[in-house]
Amino acid sequence: MMPRPPRSPARSVGRAVALAALLLTALPVAHAQDARALGMGGVRVAGPSAADVNPAFAAIPGGGASLTLPLGALSAVTRDYWDPTGPNFDALSTFDQASNLGLYLLDPAISPDQVTVSVDANGLSVAFQGGSPMRLAQPARLSEGLDLPLGGSLGPVHLAVRPFLHVHADLVPGTDTAQVFQGGSPSASATLRADAEAGVAIDVGTALALPVPAAALGGGQLYAGVQGSAVAGLARASLDLQGQAQAEQDSSGNYTGNVLYSYSGTTALGGLTNGTVGYGGEAALGLALTLPSPAGTITAGASVRHLGVMVWNLDETQLQADQSSSTSTPLGTVQEVLYARHVRVAANLALDVPSDVLSVPGMRLLVAADGDLDLSGGFASHLGAEARFGPIAARAGVGYQDGLRLGLGGGFDAGPVGIDVALTTHRSPFTDHQAFGVAASLAFGL
Amino acid sequence: MNLLRTRTLAPVVLALALTAVLSGCSTHTALKVQADLVPFLGAANTQATVSYTGGPVTLYLPPNSSNPSGGALIDLTSLGVPSSAIAAVDSLSLDLAADLTPTTDIGAGTATLYVADASAADVFQSQYAVASANVPALTASQTGQVTASFAIDAASHAAALARIQSGSFRIGVAVQGSASAPGQLQIDVTRLLVGVSLPPGFGLP
């Protein structure tokens, strides 16, 4: 028997990370889009599983919690693009899959076969051959969060302790930089703002049916929900940089051969790094209305989330550099008060059509749409439908969420536990590649 | 004449960093850096008028006015590429185009690429010759374009590639022909496109 070759440390680390990710992503039960939502193009449907979008949804009967299976972690076993020491390591594929651990990506984005950097009379240009079509001329936004709510309900009150790690980054290339990827430019500029925070939050929330006479609402029912969070910040790092480079030209317009570049900005570190703890809180408010109609039951909801403030004591450093010098100047410890940084406003609308209206025995049809606006930038909207035939569901939908998103899905309700699966697409980061992925969720109490 | 001085190609450094982070950190992604050096040289180093005698004629390109046999010094380290990556350069290409206007006829000849050590005083020595290409005949008082393309890799030019992999080297092209009579030649180099290719992984650890 041939001896088994030793496993590389990097591969072992990769598998360990994948396993850890699997465990971590299995914990948050009621967050993010589950397979049911993905099968409907990403639309969130009123019910407890969508309480993270609208806290009032927790009070609406029907539906239940869902557990999205971290199928993406399987790629650590089935694919070799994770292995940095292997011949097929691909950073872009790895990033695409790692940022979508709820999906098993069938065709993640692929790095170019060749990158050609050219300098000529037009300045600098960069071209890519092979791989997924790169999309570096557009602003890039990274917003990832890992929340691990551990708790449960105590009567009408929901309590949870929620460790979290949130990362936000915005890279905005200047128009001249965009030209670098589209034919050439003598200059390039960009702004980078990034921050990462980690800490622990204590969430307290409740949702209830408001005692409004049904007659006043046309036979409908109004629900309200609120969630408050007290947050202890354990670590924060932020970076705010503006940079540019310019090919120097003489009075005749000829290149001198020199490039003038500069960047400036600040870095800030706080929390455990300087012995302080950030503190603050945030709130989410939501309303929902269910309304009977001749066509079926209409459910509408509106919410505002992430209303809050955080206070940090940060050690700031001013950075300044150009082609001849660079300085790094400590600015001391400053108190940073951050208000409502990532406030989101969402609206949902759904129509649940029963079988008697459809004139199809045993069939129900749900049509739903939603919109979610991040006031700091970014918008998502989805439209989807679900047809139920007894315990079996079929779904389809379309959405816009960092690019076009399509979904097809199905489900089987076995009583207290059901399973949902979805085939979905998303636009891979930094590219125009539409990647297909498979998701699966367990549904409870459907 | 150091064509690629430090900071000259700072945007290349930025682009390298960007592409390395976003896409180059993949073991199948190769990198090619190419620069048309003519815009950086200016007219003083790309245009010249030289005299020649009848019979065999040799022209040295680019027309380095301060050191005619010095060719062009290329310092890859100024690209900001780590030395380990420079050592992994697996090929170099050179595309040359020049408009030549002689006052007398010059017969068809050859263009020969030379790659020498950075310290070489005379690039155009036989031990530095790498490859040759044919050039057409030039007619008196008419502008003819001479183009030549060269490729250097380990299989065909190991010694030259080793000089390139040192990170700093000199290149030059000698155009040889036979003039029908003494005269003068106007030289206008219109393209001097140098490209270096790095293997997948860029040779980085």
Image (cartoon, coloured by chain):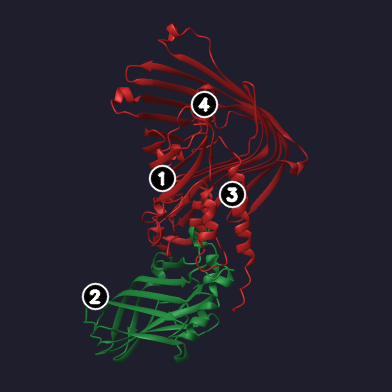
Chain colours: A red, B green
What residue would you read off at disc 1?
A424
Residue type indicated by callout 3 = Leu
Q: Which of marks 2 and 1 is in front?
A: 1
Circle 4: is it few (<14), some (14-19), or many (20+) Cα within 10 Å? many
Frontmost residue, B38 versus A155: A155
* Callout 3 secondary element: helix
Seen from this angle, which residue lies furthest right? A275
Can you give x and y, in whole percent of width and height, for residue A49 in the image?
Answer: 52, 32
Circle 2: is it few (<14), some (14-19), or many (20+) Cα within 10 Å? some
Residue A54 marker: 4
Q: Can residue A173 be seen in this view?
A: no
Answer yes or no: are tags 3 and 4 on the same subunit.
yes
Circle 1: is it few (<14), some (14-19), or many (20+) Cα within 10 Å? many
Pointer 3 indicates a residue of which chain? A
Frontmost residue, A336 versus B7: A336
Can you give x and y, in whole percent of width and height, for residue B150 in the image?
Answer: 37, 79
Distance between mark 2 and mark 3 Cα atoms: 70 Å
Circle 3: is it few (<14), some (14-19), or many (20+) Cα within 10 Å? some
Answer yes or no: are tags 3 and 1 on the same subunit.
yes
Q: Is residue A438 left or right of residue A161?
A: left
Residue B143 marker: 2
| Dot 3 and dot 1 residues touching (CB under 8 Å) | no
Distance between mark 2 and mark 1 Cα atoms: 62 Å
